[in-house]
Amino acid sequence: MQAVQVKPELKVLFTRAQILARVNEMGAQITRDFAGQPIIFVGVLKGATVFLSDLARAVQLDATFDFIAVSSYGKAAHSSGEVRLTKDLDQSVNDKNVILVEDILDTGLTLTYLRKLLVAHQPRALKLAALLDKPSRRVQPITADYTGFQIPDHFVVGYGMDHAERYRNLPDICVLPPELF
Ligand code: IMP
Ligand code: MG
């Protein structure tokens, strides 16, 4: 298989092999936790799409996909940054087992907002899966039920994650150096 060349200015933090090994473990855990029950993966657009596609294929359960989108204001500058829903669910999650799938748990504002929104629909179970977690950045006290890797306060791109919409298709997770901001 032809490897996609990582941009020379980016430093690889997790290779695609490391990511896949961890995502497969997460999928096995979800399979055990929901043994025999159907689940709905709800991905947060757009960053979670690559993670969701690997995670879902590592889960051996009857599953469907849905997607939700948000935009946040004043994220970088204000810890009170607001989150706004820009795309709602297509299907009802009432009485369903929901796994909310996010790329990064950072300040926690996004997942706190989305968890509240989904809880209002009274799912049977609601679990949070985040590929990456930056605990040092947390503003809202929230933890994921399934976490891929904890990382320090670096800005990362690749495997679905972007900077100004670029780099989402890099297969590895890379650190974007501050001079490229
Ligand atoms: P939170 O509301 O601060 O937890 O924001 C989480 C969202 O911020 C993630 O879904 C990402 O879209 C974005 N984000 C946070 N850190 C990074 C990063 O290092 N690279 C790319 N996106 C990030
Ligand atoms: Mg995101």
Image (cartoon, helix red, strand yellow):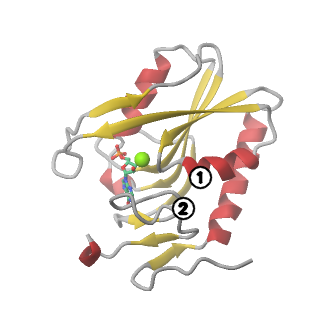
Q: Nearer the viewer, residue 115 or 47?
A: 47
Percent coordinates x, y for residue 62 in the rendering:
79, 31
Residue at image position (51%, 14%) is 121
Percent coordinates x, y for residue 107 in the rendering:
32, 46
Q: Which element is circle 1 on? A: helix
Give the number of marks.
Answer: 2
Percent coordinates x, y for residue 142 in the rendering:
41, 38
Residue behind mark 2: 159
Residue behind mark 1: 51
Instruction: Answer with the quarter of the image where residue 179 lies.
Output: bottom left
The kind of residue tagged 1 is: Phe
Residue at image position (22%, 41%) is 73
Q: Nearer the viewer, residue 10 or 135?
A: 10
Measured Cα–Cα span from mark 1 to mark 2: 7 Å
Q: Which element is circle 2 on? A: loop
Residue 140 is at least partly visible in this image: no
Residue at image position (66%, 55%) is 23
The kind of residue tagged 2 is: Tyr
